[in-house]
Image (cartoon, helix red, strand yellow):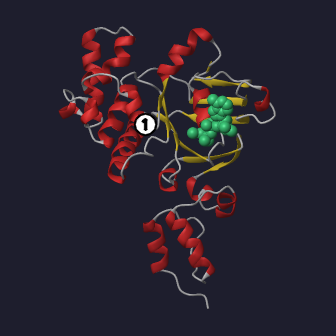
Amino acid sequence: MKNRPEIAIETRKLAYHYPGEENISSPAVYGINLSVKRGEYVSLIGPNGSGKTTLLKLFNALLAPTDGEVLVEGISTTEEESQTEIRRNCGMIFQNPDNQLVATTVEEDIAFGLENLELPSPEIRKRVNRVAGELGLEHLLKHPPHLLSGGEKGRVAIAGILAMQPSCILMDEPTAMLDSKSRQDVLGAVRRLNREQGLAVVHVTHFPEEAARADRVVILHQGRLIEQGPPALVLNNLQLLHQLGLQGTASSELAALLRTDGFSIPQEILNCQELVQSLCSSELKN
Ligand SMILES: Nc1ncnc2c1ncn2[C@@H]1O[C@H](COP(=O)(O)OP(=O)(O)O)[C@@H](O)[C@H]1O
Ligand SMILES: [Mg+2]
């Protein structure tokens, strides 16, 4: 593995406003100081229009900051000669995998970015086989991508990015169009690579249950970073979440409801297992 800095992505006073007079007074992203460590899994949540997609595009040099800066592996995204390297290093997965699948077989699709890098064919084959194995796609390599299930397509899109050996992946609501089984497939695969290979992940999601599985949750509101911390704290700050039109996990919401009914339940409930355990040992106060 390459010798890489501890911090995968760092922003300093990052701001961006889209071109046009009317956007100057309301920047899409403003004053963001954030660092994502190598191997860290960060969930990014926030209402529609809060700047999540814009922030991801700033991370991988699709947009250049209006103010402040973004460093990927210590390199500024405004250095033109580094932009191709940054996009390779910090791959982005969009909401709809269909938009990322371009070739006639899964194998060619995964190899697409590698062909563009003009790597030697044996190296391309080696990498395609490796990521196909990691994502459980070996048996589908000769299949046309458009005939796959949603979860399989999602995994092929991710395989194409991972074949480029990025140090970080950016996922913009990658599971919004998938059924629950496919969501688990795709996110399970990413989580494993995060744990086993130190891949940094920034995952925009509107599913609180997905955010709950991150190492850290970051909340954006009107382009500003307004809260961040461990999922058990951030996703139990229901007052703030509700103010923003967001929700905690089903279990944190239910735990709050039960507390108002007199059950003594700890503040940091995130999932059913924790809730059931605390209920089994809980008694009505009154
Ligand atoms: N291409 C664009 N041109 C002008 N304004 C845009 C463009 N894309 C997004 N915006 C504005 O920037 C803000 C943040 O948008 P976005 O990053 O897409 O938010 P999110 O992904 O959280 O929904 C919104 O106010 C949105 O209207
Ligand atoms: Mg968006």
Residue at 56% from the left image edge and 78% from the top image edge: 258
Whether residue 63 sits left or right of residue 162 in the image: it is: right
How many marks can you see?
Answer: 1
Residue 168 in percent (x, y) is at: 49, 30
Q: Which residue is mark 1?
A: 96
Q: Is residue 190 above or below residue 115?
A: below
Foreground pick, 118 / 198 = 118
Q: Is residue 179 above or below residue 262?
A: above
Instruction: Judge whether residue 52 can be spotted in this image.
Output: no
> How many neighbours does mark 1 have within 10 angstroms: few (below 14), some (14-19), or many (20 or more)?
some
- What's under tag 1, amino acid-wise? Asn
Whether residue 83 sits left or right of residue 225 in the image: it is: left
Residue 261 in percent (x, y) is at: 60, 83
In what quadrant of the picture does the N terminus appear? Answer: top left
Residue at 28% from the left image edge and 32% from the top image edge: 146
Residue furthest toward the bottom?
A: 286
Instruction: Judge whether residue 188 can be spotted in this image.
Output: yes
Q: Is residue 271 above or below residue 86?
A: below
In what quadrant of the picture does the C terminus appear? Answer: bottom right
Q: Picture quarter containing residue 174?
A: top left
Residue furthest toward the right?
A: 25
Q: Secondary structure at mark 1?
A: loop
Residue 64 in percent (x, y) is at: 66, 21
Ligand 2: quadrant of the figure = top right
Q: Picture quarter containing residue 23?
A: top right
Residue 29 in percent (x, y) is at: 70, 35
